[in-house]
Image (cartoon, rainbow, N blue to C red):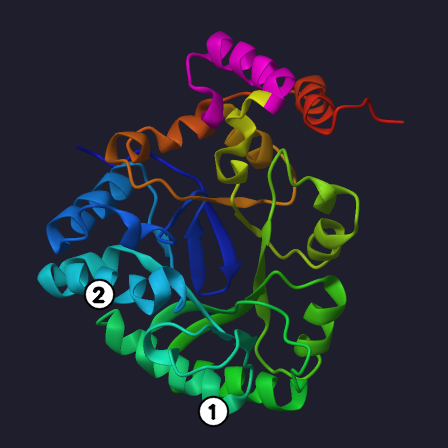
């Protein structure tokens, strides 16, 4: 079957990501983590035109990257068909960091370099397409963290770098000590996490022509809970009008924004992966966008 045509977003001169991204945060929670089953998920993504896989060293208690790596070892040709995003900088008392006394952040050069080496080994690859610093670190020394990221890009082990959950000032601070450009900020954006549309986070990225990645674009399923029935009513009405399900409308709401938001979908259900690209078929006009925004916030705009 020919892959579904999906727009691609140019993050840097030599890196494009698919407009929808497959998130592997919960891949270790699936009852079946076999290479064959993981490969089936990736193939379902590719059939939708979703080529970008989102990982982090900490996912699954430091196990998720190796689950992906087992699939890539079994089917090495898959590596050339996908882009791998991963993250580092969180140290939790689990897996390889089980000796840690307290969950903390580490953006030292030594930790970032060691994390990348572990990620490369676990994912059975010799390069990472996009490496993100997972969380702002109160102890970050930009003059150490920035050059460490630059060195990884120069080495070829990492093609591009970015951040996750950074506020504009954190982003600006790190960028000030770097040669390489930070190409994205992965932040929480959904109908139930819409503060970024007014608090300056998105505006900062738009001003710099930096496309944001959106984690939990369905608010971890929260938009479907009974307390958000007014929002669900609008989502379901638009979905019925356009022949898709409500989740496709919620994703389309993000896709409609001019910031070129890249939503990260996180389902383990292959049937749901297979309909992910329905979001790109939904038409959202300005009034429908604001109707959803109003239903989500519970009040009309001023």
Q: Per the image, is 148 magenta? A: no
Dot 1 alpha-carbon crowd within 10 angstroms: few under 14, some 14 to 19, many 20 or more: few
Residue carrying label 1: 110
Q: Nearer the viewer, residue 201 or 91?
A: 91
The main secondary structure of the magenta stretch is: helix
Element type at marker 1? helix
| Segment colored magenta | 227-248
Q: Per the image, is 235 magenta? A: yes
Residue at the (47%, 86%) spot, across then down: 111
Separation of marks 2 and 1 at Cα, in angstroms: 23 Å
| Place of residue 51 in the rendered image (x, y in percent of width and height, measured from the top left) | 33, 49
Which residue is farthest front? 101
Q: Quadrant of the C terminus?
A: top right
Residue at the (66%, 90%) spot, across then down: 143
Q: Earlier in the sequence, mark 2 or mark 1?
A: 2
Left or right? Give the position of 298 relative to 153: right
Element type at marker 2? helix
The image's mark for residue 69 is 2
Above/below status of 71 relative to 267: below
| Place of residue 167 in the rendered image (x, y in percent of width and height, measured from the top left) | 71, 62
The image's mark for residue 274 is none
Residue at the (35%, 59%) spot, across then down: 83
Left or right? Give the position of 20 relative to 145: left
Q: Can see residue 148?
A: yes
């Amino acid at each position: 079957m020919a892959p579904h045509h999906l727009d691609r977003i140019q993050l840097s001169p030599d890196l494009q990501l698919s407009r929808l991204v497959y998130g592997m945060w919960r891949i270790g929670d699936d009852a079946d983590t076999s290479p064959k089953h993981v490969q089936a998920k990736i193939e379902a993504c590719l059939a939708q035109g979703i080529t970008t896989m989102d990982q982090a060293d900490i996912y699954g208690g430091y196990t998720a990257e190796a689950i992906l790596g087992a699939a890539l070892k079994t089917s090495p040709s898959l590596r050339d068909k996908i882009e791998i995003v991963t993250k580092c900088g969180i140290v939790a008392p689990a897996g390889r960091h089980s000796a840690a006394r307290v969950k903390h952040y580490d953006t030292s050069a030594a930790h970032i370099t060691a994390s990348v080496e572990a990620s490369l080994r676990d994912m059975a690859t010799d390069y990472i397409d996009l490496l993100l610093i997972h969380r702002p670190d109160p102890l970050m020394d930009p003059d150490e963290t920035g050059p460490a990221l630059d060195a990884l890009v120069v080495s070829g082990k990492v093609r591009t770098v970015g951040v996750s959950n950074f506020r504009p000032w954190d982003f600006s601070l790190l960028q000030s000590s770097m040669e390489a450009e930070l190409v994205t900020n992965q932040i929480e954006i959904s109908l139930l996490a819409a503060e970024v549309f007014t608090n300056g986070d998105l505006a900062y990225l738009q001003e710099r022509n930096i496309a944001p990645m959106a984690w939990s674009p369905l608010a971890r399923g929260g938009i479907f809970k009974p307390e958000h029935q007014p929002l669900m009513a609008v989502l379901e009405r638009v979905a019925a009008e356009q022949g898709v399900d409500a989740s496709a409308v919620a994703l389309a709401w993000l896709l409609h924004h001019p910031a070129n938001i890249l939503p990260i979908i996180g389902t383990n259900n292959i049937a749901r992966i297979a309909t992910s690209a329905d979001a790109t078929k939904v038409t959202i006009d300005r009034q429908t966008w604001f109707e959803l925004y109003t239903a989500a916030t519970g009040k009309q705009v001023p």
